[in-house]
């Protein structure tokens, strides 16, 4: 059985989020690259397989690229929540827990993508279950 393809947010979605939240873009190219990363296909194979791996890649890429003047820790979380939502999932993350984790991502000791994916998976629920 073939897995359902993951639908990815696009640059237009990120620009819309930034506009609605009053976030100012410093580098649209960095934002576009970070948004496109999780959908990469290398030698005919997905670079990131499954929604959690793609979510981890998106969270990491946007966080590391610093595409905004301010809000570089908020935007990746919102975009990952959008990724999950358009794929029928919801992320349930407490404010303090989310803040602690995104600060860990932004810190000097950076967790690997597999840890980020696992963290996201533990907090993901089908939309119908909520």
Image (cartoon, helix red, strand yellow):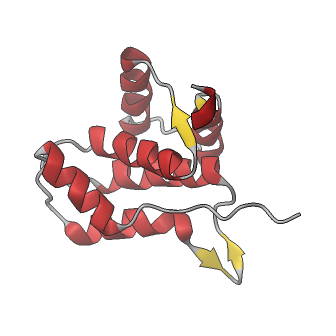
Which residue is at 54% across, 47% downward?
A: 56
Which residue is at 37% across, 70% downward?
A: 33
> For residue 104, what is the image quadrant?
top left
Q: Quadrant of the N terminus?
A: bottom right
Measuring from the top left, give residue 51's x and y in whole percent: 62, 52
Measuring from the top left, give residue 46's x and y in whole percent: 67, 70
Q: Quadrant of the C terminus?
A: top right
In the image as oriented, which residue stretches furthest toward the front? Answer: 128
Which residue is at 64% across, 67% downward?
A: 47
Measuring from the top left, give residue 72's x and y in whole percent: 25, 44
* Res 73 visible: no
> For residue 122, what is the image quadrant?
top right
Q: Nearer the viewer, residue 86 or 21?
A: 86
**Residue 39 versus residue 83 in the image, above or below:** below
Q: Nearer the viewer, residue 63 or 84?
A: 84
Which residue is at 44% across, 69% downward?
A: 36
Measuring from the top left, give residue 60's x and y in whole percent: 45, 49
**Residue 4 versus residue 55 in the image, above or below:** below
Label tally: 0
* Res 72 visible: yes
> For residue 117, what is the image quadrant?
top right
Q: Nearer the viewer, residue 35 or 86?
A: 86
In the image as oriented, which residue stretches furthest toward the right? Answer: 1
């Amino acid at each position: 059985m073939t897995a359902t393809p993951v639908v990815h947010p696009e640059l237009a979605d990120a620009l819309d989020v930034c506009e609605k939240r009053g976030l100012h873009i410093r580098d649209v190219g960095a934002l576009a690259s970070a948004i496109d990363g999780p959908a990469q296909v290398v030698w005919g194979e997905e670079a990131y397989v499954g929604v959690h791996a793609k979510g981890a890649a998106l969270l990491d890429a946007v966080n590391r690229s610093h595409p905004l003047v301010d809000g570089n820790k908020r935007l990746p979380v919102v975009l990952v929540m959008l990724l999950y939502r358009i794929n029928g999932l919801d992320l349930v993350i407490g404010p303090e827990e989310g803040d602690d984790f995104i600060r860990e991502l932004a810190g000097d000791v950076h967790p690997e993508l597999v840890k980020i994916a696992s963290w996201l998976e533990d907090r993901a629920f089908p939309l119908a279950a909520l």
